[in-house]
């Protein structure tokens, strides 16, 4: 059974406050799931790019101790 946005909104307004809150949570979760899939796909592309740069010798590598030392300096400010 197809509903228009207006029909869905009217039906949702008939729900109890708790049920409306649950519906909102479910709808937001569905948006986050879609966005999460996009983000994960983008990270997969970025990981591949970085691995390829490393394998070609084009990546500038920084020792972990240098990274952590710099992070400590920043957090001490």
Image (cartoon, rainbow, N blue to C red):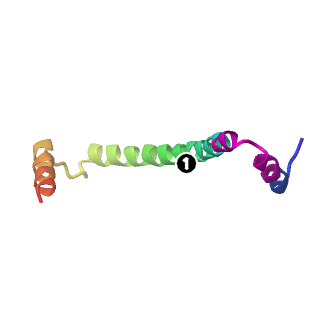
**Placement of the C terminus among the 4 image quadrants:** bottom left
Q: Residue at x 67, y 42 (%)?
A: 23
At label 1, counting other C-alpha atoms closer than 10 Å, the crowd grade (few under 14, some 14-19, many 20 or more) is few
Q: Nearer the viewer, residue 25 or 72?
A: 25
Q: How many marks?
A: 1
The kind of secondary structure element at disc 1 is: helix
Q: Residue at x 62, y 43 (%)?
A: 30
Image position of 24 (left or right of 13): left
Q: Residue furthest bottom?
A: 77
Q: Position of residue 17 (x, y in %)?
A: 68, 44
Q: Which residue is mark 1?
A: 35
Q: Residue at x 54, y 43 (%)?
A: 37
Q: Position of residue 11 (x, y in %)?
A: 81, 47
Membership of 26 in magenta stretch: no
Q: Nearer the viewer, residue 25 or 59?
A: 25
Membership of 11 in magenta stretch: yes
Q: Position of residue 25 (x, y in %)?
A: 60, 43
Q: Position of residue 31 (x, y in %)?
A: 60, 47
Image position of 31 (left or right of 3): left
**Placement of the N terminus among the 4 image quadrants:** top right
What range of the chain is rendered magenta? 8-21
Image quarter for residue 63?
top left
Image position of 52 (left or right of 13): left
Q: Nearer the viewer, residue 27 or 17?
A: 17
């Amino acid at each position: 059974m197809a509903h228009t946005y207006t029909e869905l909104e009217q039906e949702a307004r008939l729900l109890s406050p708790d049920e409306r809150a649950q519906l909102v949570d479910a709808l937001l979760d569905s948006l986050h799931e879609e966005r999460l899939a996009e983000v994960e796909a983008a990270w997969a592309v970025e990981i591949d790019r970085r691995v390829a740069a490393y394998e070609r010798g084009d990546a500038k590598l920084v020792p972990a101790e240098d990274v952590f030392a710099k992070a400590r300096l920043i957090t001490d400010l």
